[in-house]
Image (cartoon, helix red, strand yellow):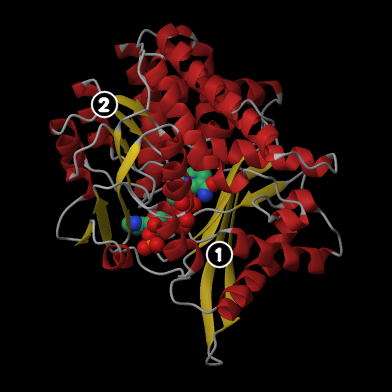
Amino acid sequence: MKGVDEKLAPMIAEVLSRNAGEGEFHQAVQEVLDSLTRVIAKRPDYLNDALLERICEPERQIIFRVPWIDDKGQVQVNRGFRVQFNSALGPYKGGIRFHPSVTLGTIKFLGFEQTFKNALTGMPIGGGKGGSDFNPRGRSNGEIMRFCQSFMTELHRHLGEYTDVPAGDIGVGGREIGYMFGQYKRLTNRYEAGVLTGKALVYGGSRARTEATGYGAVYFVERMLQSRGDSVEGKRVVVSGSGNVAIYTIEKIREFGGIVVACSDSNGFVVDEAGIDLDLVKDIKEVRRARIAEYAEIKKSARYVERGHGSIWDVPCQIAMPSATQNELTDKGARSLVANGVLVVGEGANMPSTPEAVRVFKEAGVLFAPGKAANAGGVATSALEMQQNASRDSWTFEQTETRLASIMRNIHDTCAQTAEEYGEPGDYVLGANIAGFVRVAEAMRALGVI
Ligand code: NDP
């Protein structure tokens, strides 16, 4: 494939230099384009019409000021972003993240990943992502509401159920979606339920959306294991994070008979050999919005390890599900997991494993499910929420979860079959990148040079 690499290399170099300083975006682009060598060898026509260059260039990037007033009456200013990456397959679709680490590069990497993830679901949704460097930690309910209202006051002019449909992500859950939807409705004087997903049931949300990303990731891992004659049942599992994705990953792992022994937040992690008490985690994180350290104060079977004094990836397990944030699992963590006999790594978060960590898993023959495939259940269920909104319908939990399970099976099988077709059976990274790319590329070509 030397000839292909020679053609792709200058193109990758050009993308990196056009987006200087955006390390996470570089990482995401590099990973996808590296996987394309095998596609280009079979289909050199994908190099025509600057198709790859266009796929790496967002259709539109919006950056805006978000002024708001805190509880002391002081004016605060944050920066808002929405990157509308690719709408070849449908309206832009992707979450909004509120975290102080958010930069344009973060949102571009997430929007790029989202484009291929959404394609993998087989549903009519394009890719986008948004967010702000606003830090919700320690902010009162009133401050959160005023921030969300100000954020939406600018963003609303770029949204619409046929244009761009955001959802939640880190720091944005049901409460924030509610405040943003309320402001959108007020500004537009339209009850356009399909403009945001992740809504509460009472005003047009879908059952199982809250659970969907975590549940979907576990369905994916179960399918991987089943295809090798194994299952989640009886396995020791470590899940990082304790937010939306982590909580519902833990819930579904338990339903499948696995035992989750550790979870974390950004301050540290807890290990509970008796199995993580999910009701307690939900109370700490969803109700009281407190720190995971409290878990070990309440549960005597648990120990807490503060950040910097150990790694959650040193806790022995057979299944690891990184579900907090990007690049949280490095080669050191990966080597530790492998040394302790990990069989499967399923990414609940977006790009939580560094490229070096992925290499360690590959070399050790660990089954590895990349986030763009394994965590696609969230956006797929958002698309089901859009379907329900469009038809003024509301499905039961069972109906929605059955659809989710079937979508995850399809995504798994598509990735597995694509990897096999391209000569790398078992390489889900390659399978996901190629299958997602081909769908987006085919749609873009059909639409002409736009
Ligand atoms: P939440 O805000 O609900 O939870 C995030 C969790 O990760 C919290 O426990 C948080 O700890 C921890 N965390 C966040 N940032 C860091 C950091 N820099 N270092 C260590 N820990 C951190 O977010 P979600 O659960 O929704 O999202 C988690 C991941 O899943 C993200 O990568 C997101 O993009 C991805 N994802 C989410 C989807 C969804 O439907 N929500 C869909 C697909 C992917 P603390 O409480 O201390 O902040």
Q: Counting residues from the N terminus, which is met first, the one under dot 1 or under dot 2?
A: 1
Residue drawn at (54%, 88%) of the image: 71
Mark 1 and mark 2: span between their CA atoms?
A: 40 Å
Residue drawn at (31%, 55%) of the image: 264
The residue indicated by pointer 2 is 343
**Count of numbered circles in the view:** 2
Ligand 1 within 8 Å of disc 1? The answer is no
* Picture coordinates of residue 330, whole percent (x, y): 23, 43
Indicate the secondary structure of the residue bearing disc 2: loop
Q: Is residue 200 left or right of residue 82?
A: right
Quarter of the rendering containing residue 229: top left
- The answer to whether mark 1 and mark 2 are in CB contact below 8 A is no
Name the quadrant of the N terminus.
top left
Q: Is residue 450 left or right of residue 221?
A: right
Q: Is residue 435 left or right of residue 148?
A: left
Name the quadrant of the C terminus.
top right
Taking 251 as reference, is 185 above or below it? below
Q: Residues within 10 Å of mark 1 (few under 14, many from 20)?
A: many
The residue indicated by pointer 1 is 80
Residue 112 appears in the rendering: no
Amino acid type, residue under disc 1 in the picture: Gly
Residue drawn at (15%, 35%) of the image: 335
Q: Nearer the viewer, residue 400 or 190?
A: 400
Nearest-to-viewer mark from 1 and 2: 2
Residue drawn at (50%, 10%) of the image: 43
Taking 3 as reference, is 331 above or below it? below
Amino acid type, residue under disc 2 in the picture: Leu
Q: Residues within 10 Å of mark 2 (few under 14, many from 20)?
A: some
Taking 345 as reference, is 278 above or below it? below
